[in-house]
Every structure is written in C-alpha cells, then in structure tokens.
Amino acid sequence: MMGTDLDFILRLSLNMVAVFVLVRFVYFRVHTNRAYAAAFILFGLGVFLVTSQLSSVDISMGFAFGLFAIFSMLRYRTESITIKEMTYLFLVIAMSLLSGVGVTDHATLVVLFVLICALAYFTETNLLLPSLEERDIHYEKIENIVPERREALMADLRERLGEEVRTVEIESVDFLRDTARLKVQIRPVR
C-alpha cells in the first residue's frame, strides 16, 4: 500500500509542477489572463484526481479522455474561449491524463512534460512565427473594400494605424451606414 501511495504523490507532484510550469511560465508570460491561468491549474488538478481514482476501475485511457473532453466542452461551450486558450486547456488535460491514468514510468513522464512545455514555449516565441496582433476595426471608407482598391485599403490602414498591416479580412459590410467591419493583422512595433 505504501508504494502505491508514494506513486500517487509522485505522479500528482509531477503533474502539478508540469501544469504550473506550462501555465505560469509559458501561457501567463504572453497571455496575462489570470482567470484562465487559475482555471487551467485547477482543471489539471481535478482531471488528475478523478482519472487517478478511475484508474483503479477497469476503464481505458480513451474513455477517460473522452469523459473529460465532454466535461470541458460542456463548461466552455457557452463562454467565448479562443483557440489558444482551448489549446492550453487541451495540454493541461493531456498532461493530467498521462500522469493520472497512464502507465508510463516517472522518467518518461518528466521527459514528456519537459517536451510539451518546451514546445509550447517555443511556439510562443518569434523564432517559429512572427508576432502578429489581430484587431477588429470599423472602417468608413467603404469604397476601398472592393478587390480593385485593395492596395488603397492597405495603404490607408497603414497610415492611420501607424503600424505594418499584414492582412485584412472583411468581416461584414453595413451599407446603411457605409461602414465595414475589418479584421486586421498587424505586426506590433516593439
């Protein structure tokens, strides 16, 4: 009995340290949303505790993962959650499932967690992809939204925003008010 208690505590510790590193030093470094960060940590703890208790019951890893996928969708489907936050939630769930139900040894868990955290950190840097910000803009020069005037639209946005405009997507057009809603990706000036 002592061995299984020690294994449980070690797996719980590995899971919580890995989730904390992922959330605090990768996610929170770039996206300073405290509510999501706290929710990710608590979600990781909850997933680990439930799956580790369910591991004594004869269920598969797929069943456990499906169970928590349903729980996460039920909770977050009404709230507007970005793809980035959903990805971090998925990573927290996966890490907690690996440590809660998985049959991998502790050294392999550490290697997997380091790999997950390192890759998440790497994807948040400018080394892989350039840093872009997305903005929703209400635009009144509706004559510039036609394909033939694309360059005029880009030049006008660059001049008005004072930043490098990478892409422009027309979200909607209001012909009554002669305005358009644009989604603009810019490279932030640092």
Image (cartoon, rainbow, N blue to C red):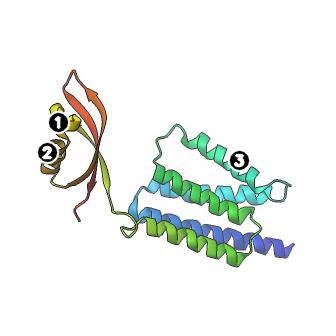
Q: Position of residue 25 (x, y in %)?
A: 46, 69
Identity, as a three-letter code, of the amino acid under mark 2: Asp
Residue toward you, 168 or 59: 168
| Tag 2–tag 1 contact (CB < 8 Å) | yes
Which residue is rendered at x = 75% and y = 69% of the image?
A: 8
Q: Which residue is mark 1?
A: 144
Cα distance, mark 2 to mark 1? Answer: 9 Å
Cα distance, mark 3 to mark 1? Answer: 49 Å
Cα distance, mark 3 to mark 2? Answer: 50 Å
Q: Which residue is mark 2?
A: 156
Residue 104, disc: none
Identity, as a three-letter code, of the amino acid under mark 3: Leu
Which of the two marks, 3 or 2, is nearer to us in this view?
Answer: 2
Helix, strand or loop at label 1? It is helix
Q: Position of residue 78 (x, y in %)?
A: 52, 37
Please report whichever mark, 3 or 2, sits nearer to the chain's N-terminal start. 3
Question: Across the whole image, how many numbered discs are drawn on residues?
Answer: 3
